[in-house]
Each structure stands twice: as C-alpha cells, then as structure tokens.
Amino acid sequence: MTIQTLSKLIRPALAHPDFLKITDEAAGGFIVFRVSVHGADYGRLCGKEGRNLKSLNAIVEPIAPGSRVVLNAALTRDRFEHVQPDPNWNPEPVLEMLRAWNEAAGVGGSVEISEQPRETFFYDVFFTEQPPPEIINAVAKWASIVAQSLGGKISIHGAERAAAVAA
C-alpha cells in the first residue's frame, strides 16, 4: 500500500485535510504508517477508545498485511468540531474513498451508490462483489465516519443486497 492510497482513505474524514501528513517506516518486517492531523481532527480520527483508528487499521490489513496505522499525538487538541447533518451533502467523497479501498484490496467488481437518498441525508452504497466477511463491518464503520464528517449518513450493502435491489 502506498501513502497516496492511505491518504485517499483518510482525507475525506478530516475537517482540515490540508494538515494531513503521512510517513512510512519499516519496522520488524512490516510497515508503520505514521499519521499526523490537525488537532481538531485528532478525536475524529482516533474515535472513542480508539475505535475509529481500529476500523482504519482493519481496512488497511487486506491491502498491506501486517501494516499498522499509528496516529501521532496532536501537539494541540483543539475542540472537536461536530458536523451538523446537511441535506445537501455530497456522498461522492465517500464513494471515491470506497472505490480506492476496493481497488487496493483487490475485491473486484465496483462500488455503486443509490441515485436518491433513502431518507434525508441517507444514501445506500453497494459493493457488486462481496468484500471478505471479516472486513465488511470495518469498511462500513470507516465509511460511516467519513459520511458523518461530511454531514451525511450511508449504509453499506454487499453483493446479495445489490442483486435484490436490482431485481
């Protein structure tokens, strides 16, 4: 996995994407990706009890086995900026992020999005090929984090659901 691919996974979740810095280093036969973000994005990326960072590491695993994403401690932890729901939010950054992950993970197929929101703010996203079962929950969690940071919500569906909707 490259720093550019990791950047595509993280950048859409950030309120201050221009502050994103990623470095990589070899450590004991695997790669450690060190991520630095603006202080206001630290909590969003880390999550409560590190849950968001765990989800990010779970979706990085199939792309770069044994690699870890480490969040560098923010020099300043500005107050977390809650994003209000936005009825005009654009789901395209989430879709681009999922497509980048899908390609890097070698899942195959494509990632599609519903033409209209199911409810206000809420879009359905479909994988035409099923990602591995052990990873789909982490992908859904990370995609939800990204969508919420943009003021929206999404629901991830695998190939079976996509076929049912198409019928």
Image (cartoon, rainbow, N blue to C red):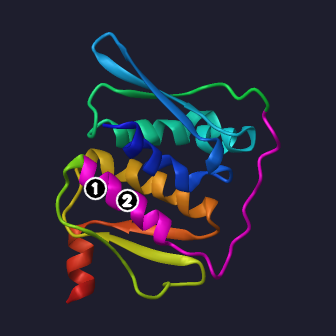
Can you tell which quarter of the image residue 40 is in?
top right
Please name the residue shown 77% across and 53% down the image: 81
Label 2–label 1 contact, CB within 8 A:
yes
Can you tell which quarter of the image residue 88 is in?
bottom right
From the top left corner, tell me how far across and down residue 27 is, in percent.
37, 12
Secondary structure of the residue carrying numbered label 2: helix
Can you tell which quarter of the image residue 129 is in?
bottom left
Against 131, is 5 above or below?
Answer: above
Q: Is residue 85 magenta?
A: yes
Q: Residue furthest right?
A: 79
From the top left corner, tell me how far across and down residue 26 is, in percent.
35, 16
Please name the residue shown 48% across and 27% down the image: 23
- Can the viewer see residue 39 in this picture? yes
Please name the residue shown 60% across and 76% down the image: 89
Name the residue type under label 2: Leu
Name the residue type under label 1: Asn
Against 32, is 104 above or below?
Answer: below
Give the crowd class for mark 1: few <14, some 14-19, many >=20 residues within 10 Å.
Answer: many
Give the number of marks.
2
- In the foreground, 48 or 6: 6
Report how far apart the C-alphas of labels 2 and 1 lie in the structure: 6 Å
Give the crowd class for mark 2: few <14, some 14-19, many >=20 residues within 10 Å.
Answer: many
Residue 98 tag number: 2
- Can the viewer see residue 145 in this picture? no
Please report the bounds of the magenta region as a residue range.
77-104
Tag 1 residue:
102
Residue 16 tag number: none
Against 161, is 42 above or below?
Answer: above
From the top left corner, tell me how far across and down residue 38 is, in percent.
70, 40
